[in-house]
Image (cartoon, grey):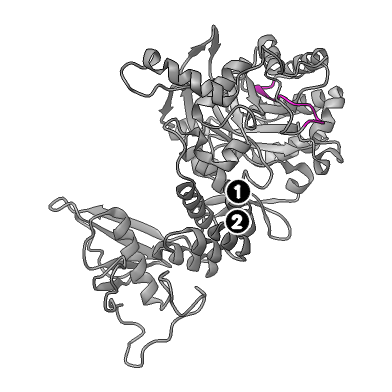
Amino acid sequence: MRTTGRGLSAPRTARSRRGARSNQASDSNRNGRPQAIIPLVQERRTAVTSRARQGLADGGWRGSVRLTELANHEEGGRICRGQQRRGYSRGGMMVNSLSLCYHNKLILAPMVRVGTLPMRLLALDYGADIVYCEELIDLKMLQCKRVVNDVLSTVDFVAPDDRVVFRTCEREQSRVIFQMGTSDAERALAVARLVENDVAGIDVNMGCPKEYSTKGGMGAALLSDPDKIEKILSTLVKGTRRPVTCKIRILPSLEDTLSLVKRIERTGIAAIAVHGRTREERPQHPVSCEAIKAIAEILSVPVIANGGSHDHIQEYLDIQDFRQATAASSVMVARAAMWNPSIFLKEGLRPLQEVMQKYIRYAVQYDNHYTNTKYCLCQMLREQLESPQGKLLHAAQSSREIWRAYSPQITPKMCLLEWCRREKLAQPVYETVQRPLDRLFCSVVTVAEQKYQSTLWDKSKKLAEQAAAIVCLRSQGLPEGRLGEESPSLNKRKREAPDQDPGAPSVQEPAVPGELCKKPFVALGSGKENPLEGL
């Protein structure tokens, strides 16, 4: 019979745990300093020589290899040694045997339509150690072509209809887990080999109860076929050089659940994530902390606890309480992170408006489709969807309309970035220096091999870059993001004044109170000397 987590032995609610913590605060933290909840595994990066690269597989970012040495870390009498696996040969070359450590980690759970690149980067900003992409189906991925996107500095996996199925960037490469939906070992291996150079690990979804996943024998449907589970995981462990994990739900019987996870562990996986509900249960049903704890107590691999957002996790300190209640090595957070990704921040939740604006910046920077951006922002708003801003968001039909609703200002840099994308130009590159004498900043932006710079210096790096962007925009006759500008499209150029030479340097118009830049500007051609040189 399944343990449900109800009764006197059940974990306390988030509210009661927070009350208990406040009573203990004076004893546990007398010096007034905040205490880290989950001790981090110490990492130190090792430089990789060209000779070392030649001796390793074709992994890493565009062929390079980043080595990370994980210090031995003792946790609860268990030693984590970086989850190091034996190397093996493929095609006559030895592959990288180092992998992620899954002990003591805060993890963003895989969530359909939520776990795209902007959300993953935002979670990393707020303290997540590992981030999962949304479940991506093997058949869809096998149709994709790997494309290096020089404009966005990303690697894209693009479908035949030119739709980007999976997008990642160098910043998350060592911490992003690719989760696939599959029911076939050979297809799973083909997908793993397709993406393994651009991700930190491979995960198989064995817990999704939704019909779109189970009807193809994927997700939670795999739980009723242990032989297929074993074949898929064994094939991946032997055939890919990245650590392999899986995410499951518990079975109605605790005995059957324990038997299944033991069999899964024998395949050689690096860790297992456990959602403490059955396939039939939904978030309103209580999560079984006891079942997760029973699993953690019998396995030697790290167990990642999942499913606590509804009853247990409402702030950062609740994550540790959930980890202790389940005896898990790490905690994976889904809906609580979807509602506010700053849940991973030990200093406490950030204001939702701030979080949403930061999300929008990533969505703009990485050209996220506006429908996905809109969906994620709606999940953050929740009960505020009926507010004036919520209604604007609901009515938005483009990224620009979303910016208008939630960004305090559409900055010149944002306008310049979008224009470069529309014109299929490389992303603007900013070179900023600080003058030692007065500690002011100046920036040069390079667009289409042309350089643009302000004649005066600004008090911050951000203002200097915005000033350089304005120079470029004005030289091209493009809007700068000011409210009320005539041209709503970044594709349209403003008409030149009758007495203005189109090739002449751009000159600042009379200043409007409250605007960012109020100084004269000049545009520098690529052949002119860069005034920043020599500083």
The label on residue 248 is: none
In the displayed structure, 481 sits above or below 254; it is: below
Amino acid marked by disc 1: Glu
Task: Place residue 390 in its image quadrant.
Answer: bottom right
The label on residue 383 is: 1
Task: Place residue 105 in its image quadrant.
Answer: top right
The crowding category of the residue bearing disc 2, from other C-alpha atoms within 10 Å (few below 14, some 14 to 19, many at least 20), is few
Decide whether the magenta segment is chiefly helix, strand or loop. Answer: loop
Amino acid marked by disc 2: Glu
> Which segment did they paint magenta?
269-281
Q: Residue at x 42, y 69 (%)?
A: 481
Residue behind mark 2: 386
Q: Nearer the viewer, residue 321 or 198?
A: 321
Tell whether label 1 touches label 2 (CB within 8 Å). yes
Q: Residue at x 62, y 47 (%)?
A: 379
Which of the image's four quarters has the C terminus?
Answer: bottom left
Q: Nearer the viewer, residue 57 or 446?
A: 446
Q: Is residue 396 left or right of residue 350?
A: right
